[in-house]
């Protein structure tokens, strides 16, 4: 078979076939009387083998070794090809993402393209200071939300991460849908950054995602969601907040959130917490109150507190000159306050062998108004553990004197 026919059947140009011949990859078995190359069936099969190996990314040098060197094993070469291919895909994906972000910014001209490109380069800088400056300056311009979200999900430096959350909270376009994808990441740090960023976003979509995150498989995500929702007045966070107090995980913040919920105006206590209706022997009968209390646009600032004996911590929510629980005696105690107190009492019963947990629960009770909390503190003042009893007695004295 002449070279033209081989080229037609194999799809390899005559010029490339001659190049293969010059490299010694394929050699025509014969020449006819006119001096033209004659390719035997074995030669044609070798051409197809060459093309197959080239399709895997092998260089022509490696193709020759693979076909002619019996000692040339494929394992090491294939592993190297896999690495190179992944690097190439990563580079192409990065380019595609950058082009997509530029397109999302809706550039009106090349100046807009250059400005967005400069921002993206700054967000990817190795300098934390340069990244932070880029985020802060982006507030004065229309910045692709997707670029800020990606940066927030990958940022390790706390100051830069805080700046990114601030910028996203001020963005005209809600980033919540993009952050929802981060909650489903297989990387724990990405999931947790997504939750912390959602906690800074004041819109309803973010609040809904945080509610869903209360059942997340990642306990850190659950805690971040509960603290944020507690600040927004969402009773769904109560069970997770109660567990945080017991476990000693951000327990002071969790108790602050429970106190804020318990002392909200009694305009509605929201849905039942996951633990069910009150079952404490101290709980008065309370009607169901399904109406949900209005949520603030942003979580309130934590209330400063004072130290108490028996535990390193603070008494939260007691205004100067007042005492924990004083709000419960000046106005009607809300059903939500009784539910929170009942949840704390239930966990005291489950913590019979953990005096540290009971001490944390006693301090959380100090900020909850109403008779359920007062009776629970009275009982804890007789606790078998001296530290628990001392803490409860001190807090009970403040509770009753108020």
Image (cartoon, rainbow, N blue to C red):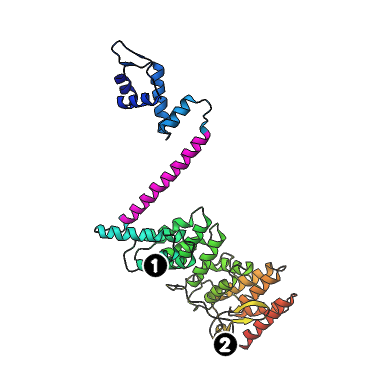
CB-based contact (under 8 Å), mark 2 and mark 1: no
- Name the residue: 42% across, 47% down: 90
Front-lying residue, 353 or 44: 44
- Up/down of 268 relative to 184, above or below: below
Residue 168: quadrant of the picture: bottom left
| Residue 184 is covered by the magenta coloring | no
Q: Does residue 302 appear to the left or right of 59 in the view shown?
A: right
Q: Position of residue 287 (x, y in %)?
A: 54, 73
- Name the residue: 43% across, 66% down: 129
* Callout 1 secondary element: helix
Label 2, label 1: how far apart the Cα atoms are: 44 Å
Q: Is most of the magenta stretch helix, strand or loop?
A: helix
Residue 325: quadrant of the picture: bottom right
Q: Position of residue 250 (x, y in %)?
A: 58, 69
Q: Which residue is mark 2?
A: 322
Mark closer to the observer (2, 1) = 1
Q: Which mark, residue 264?
A: none
- Name the residue: 58% across, 66% down: 276
**Image quadrant for the N terminus?**
top left
- Name the residue: 49% across, 35% down: 77
Comes first in the chain, label 2 or label 1:
1
Q: Position of residue 251 (x, y in %)?
A: 59, 71
Q: Which residues are magenta?
A: 75-102
Front-lying residue, 193 or 284: 193
- Up/down of 211 relative to 365, above or below: above
Residue furthest out toward the top: 33
Q: Which mark, residue 133?
A: 1
């Amino acid at each position: 078979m002449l070279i033209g026919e081989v080229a037609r059947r194999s799809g390899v140009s005559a010029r490339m076939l001659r190049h293969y011949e010059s490299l010694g990859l394929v050699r025509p078995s014969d020449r006819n009387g006119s001096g033209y190359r004659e390719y035997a069936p074995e030669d044609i099969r070798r051409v197809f083998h060459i093309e197959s190996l080239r399709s895997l990314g092998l260089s022509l040098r490696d193709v020759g070794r693979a076909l002619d060197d019996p000692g040339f094993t494929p394992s090491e070469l294939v592993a190297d090809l896999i690495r190179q291919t992944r690097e190439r895909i990563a580079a192409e994906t990065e380019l595609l993402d950058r082009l997509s972000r530029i397109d999302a910014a809706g550039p009106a001209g090349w100046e807009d393209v250059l400005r967005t490109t400069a921002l993206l380069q700054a967000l990817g800088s190795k300098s934390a200071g340069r990244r932070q400056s880029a985020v802060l300056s982006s507030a004065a311009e229309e910045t692709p939300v997707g670029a800020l979200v990606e940066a927030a999900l990958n940022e390790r430096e706390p100051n830069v991460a805080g700046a990114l959350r601030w910028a996203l909270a001020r963005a005209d376009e809600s980033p919540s849908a993009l952050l929802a994808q981060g909650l489903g990441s297989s990387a724990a740090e990405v999931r947790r950054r997504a939750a912390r960023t959602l906690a800074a976003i004041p819109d309803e979509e973010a609040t809904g995602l945080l509610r869903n995150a209360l059942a997340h498989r990642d306990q850190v995500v659950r805690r971040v969601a509960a603290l944020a929702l507690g600040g927004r007045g969402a009773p769904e966070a109560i069970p997770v907040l109660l567990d945080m107090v017991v476990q000693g995980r951000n327990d002071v913040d969790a108790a602050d959130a429970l106190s804020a919920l318990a002392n909200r105006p009694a305009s509605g206590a929201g849905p039942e917490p996951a633990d069910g209706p009150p079952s404490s022997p101290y709980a008065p009968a309370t009607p169901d109150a399904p109406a949900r209390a209005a949520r603030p646009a942003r979580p309130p600032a934590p209330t400063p507190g004072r130290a108490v004996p028996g535990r390193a911590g603070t008494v939260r929510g007691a205004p100067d000159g007042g005492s924990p629980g004083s709000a419960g005696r000046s106005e009607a105690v809300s059903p939500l306050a009784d539910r929170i107190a009942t949840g704390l009492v239930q966990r005291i019963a489950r913590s019979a062998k953990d005096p540290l947990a009971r001490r944390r629960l006693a301090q959380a009770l100090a900020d909850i108004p109403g008779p359920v909390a007062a009776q629970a503190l009275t009982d804890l003042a007789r606790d078998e553990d001296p530290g628990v009893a001392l803490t409860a007695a001190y807090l009970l004295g403040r509770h009753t004197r108020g």
